[in-house]
Amino acid sequence: MRLFLIAASCATALASSVYAQEPPPATTLEQRQAQATEMISAASAGEFFVHEDHGPAVTVRHGRSGLLCRFIYGAPGQEVIMVPSVSLGIAHGDDVACSSRNELGVITMYATRRSDVASSDEALAGAVGALRRAQPSARPVNVPPPGADEVPLPDGSRTATFMFTMDGREHFTRVSVYVRDGWVYKMRFSSPFQEANSLADASWTAALNDLPAPAGGTP
């Protein structure tokens, strides 16, 4: 829960400097479970996702990969996604995502079973290539590293950060990857505000630290 609160506080602090935003409402277990069930049903993902309560967030876990998705209760622009990758040789249920969109930007977490991707460096190269194809104007940009007091990331996490131009306006985007036990975990984040990278840092850290212990023991 601590990691979710860090991410939520980053979002609230940034949003308060840009938009007036009401604090999220208090919720009950029943309310959070109802939203989780609705989101899973909307994605026809009941075979693969289950509600796992970590209030105050609305949380669902993908059983095969262990990815835990955290959502804000009642907020629009949030969804569970079954990525259609069967034509690429990836079994149904082995390529999933969770996405949240608001005025600060779009953040999407992926989990994909990829036995052909041997390392995070290889996964990052592929993800950066896809990002550049989607955003040809993307150019690398340096961002401040996370503070020393932040929760550490597992060894093997990789991130690349960029600026790109859309509709005549500069936007920030990043891709982060982590490979473990045959799964590629990835985060895509885009925002009109480079300062929102602090939210992306907190969200990525939470996602990786929420994973169950790896098959071989300590990560």
Image (spheres, helix red, strand yellow):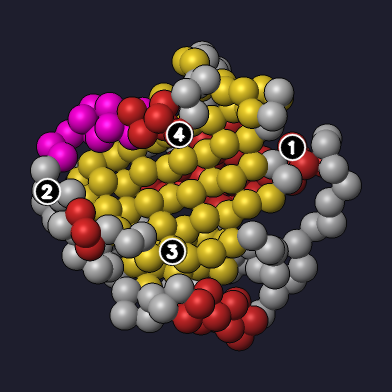
Note whether 180 is above or below 139 in the view shown.
Answer: below
Q: Give me the C-alpha separation between circle 4 and circle 1.
A: 27 Å
Name which residue type carries label 4: Ala
Residue depth check, mark 1 versus mark 3: number of the one nearer the observer: 3
Over which residues does the magenta segment extend?
117-128
SS class, disc 3: strand
Residue at image x 45%, y 69%? Answer: 60
On whether residue 121 falls in the magenta region, the answer is yes
Q: Give me the C-alpha separation between circle 3 and circle 2.
A: 21 Å
Name which residue type carries label 2: Ser
Q: State the image coordinates of residue 134 (x, y, percent, origin top left).
A: 45, 34
Q: Earlier in the sequence, mark 2 or mark 1?
A: 1
Q: Which residue is mark 3?
A: 81
Q: Earlier in the sequence, mark 3 or mark 2?
A: 3
Q: Which residue is mark 2?
A: 115
Residue at image x 69%, y 64%? Answer: 75
SS class, disc 4: helix
Q: Which residue is mark 1?
A: 14
